[in-house]
Amino acid sequence: MSGAAVGNNLSAFNILRQFHGGKPKEQLLRAYDRRDFGTQGERWQHWQRVLAGAASGEGEPEAFDAAQLATHLDELDRALDIACGRGVRVHAYWTVSHPVILPRAVDQAQLKLALWDFLARWRTRCPGGLSYWDFAHPNAITFEALRQGDAATSRYFRADGHPRPSAGQLMTATMFDRSFLPTPLRDLSTDLMRLERPQAQAWIAEREARWRGVWAPGARETLLQDLEASSQHAKP
């Protein structure tokens, strides 16, 4: 019953009152803001050309410092120790980012594989289960609105670039193997912990190469199909 709690409750009740009165969520909650990719027209059009098959000219692999990474894993190591020790099923994942929002789409294949190596050492120590998902590659969320003719208003990103709840819906459905869209997406992510290391490495490398405009046979066509399948989800 502190002043802050009372104030927060009053704010929440006021938001609910306006929502039930018909005011759109995106005008009441920041989480439901939408990014307008059209405000960055040059970069938006550049990535439309990449989706059409052009080289991106950016995102070349950067030097990977394994020693520096190791210094940042202590917190994750402690979190896994607590969660796995209590039988919690752990879902580790790379979240989505759109290349129009990013200043540069950097190839992260070595970093993602290094984290696979780190998590693989925990598999036998997590009785509840451990999964590792990569959503941070060109897919139906990260390449939304890049088809020719698509509206530039985002369905998956807030005005400040953070993923909206709609992005979380698709990621969660994928990780928990739930049906969500009428036509399932074919290439949003996969559980890399179910793959052997060479398979995980190949899966990651193929998708990171897309940031440079390098597509495996059929990959671009699959992405276009996924963009079509998700085109009505969370539509403005």
Image: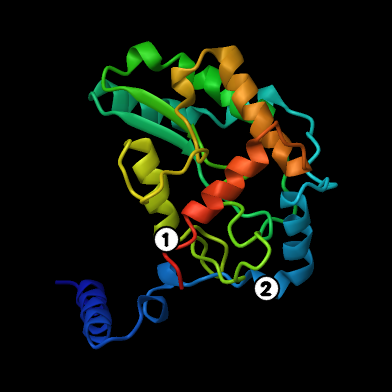
Of label 2 and label 1, which has the lower sequence position? 2
Q: Position of residue 229 (x, y in %)?
A: 47, 52
Its colouring scheme is: rainbow
Residue closest to the eye, 163 or 229: 229
Q: Is residue 140 visible?
A: no
Residue at the spot x=60%, y=26% of the render?
Answer: 203
Question: Which quadrant holds residue 102?
Answer: bottom right
SS of the residue under disc 2: helix
Q: Which mark is residue 38?
A: 2
Residues at discs 2 and 1 in contact (Cβ within 8 Å): no
Q: Position of residue 19 (x, y in %)?
A: 27, 81
Using residue 94 as the reference point, say whether residue 169 is left or right of it. Answer: left
Question: Which quadrant holds residue 71?
Answer: top right
Q: Is residue 164 visible?
A: yes
Q: Quadrant of the N terminus?
A: bottom left
Using residue 33 as the reference point, say whether residue 213 is left or right of it. Answer: right
Which residue type carries mark 2? Answer: Gly
Using residue 101 as the reference point, say whether residue 161 is left or right of it. Answer: left
Label 2: how many residues lie within 10 Å, few (<14), some (14-19) or many (20+)?
Answer: some
- Residue lying at the far left in this picture: please name it: 1
Residue closest to the eye, 235 or 70: 235
Which residue lies under the disc numbered 1? 233
Residue at the spot x=53%, y=55% of the render?
Answer: 228
State the CA–CA distance, disc 2 to disc 1: 20 Å
Q: Nearer the viewer, mark 2 or mark 1?
A: 1
Which residue type carries mark 1? Answer: His
Question: Which quadrant holds residue 43?
Answer: bottom right
Q: How many marks?
A: 2
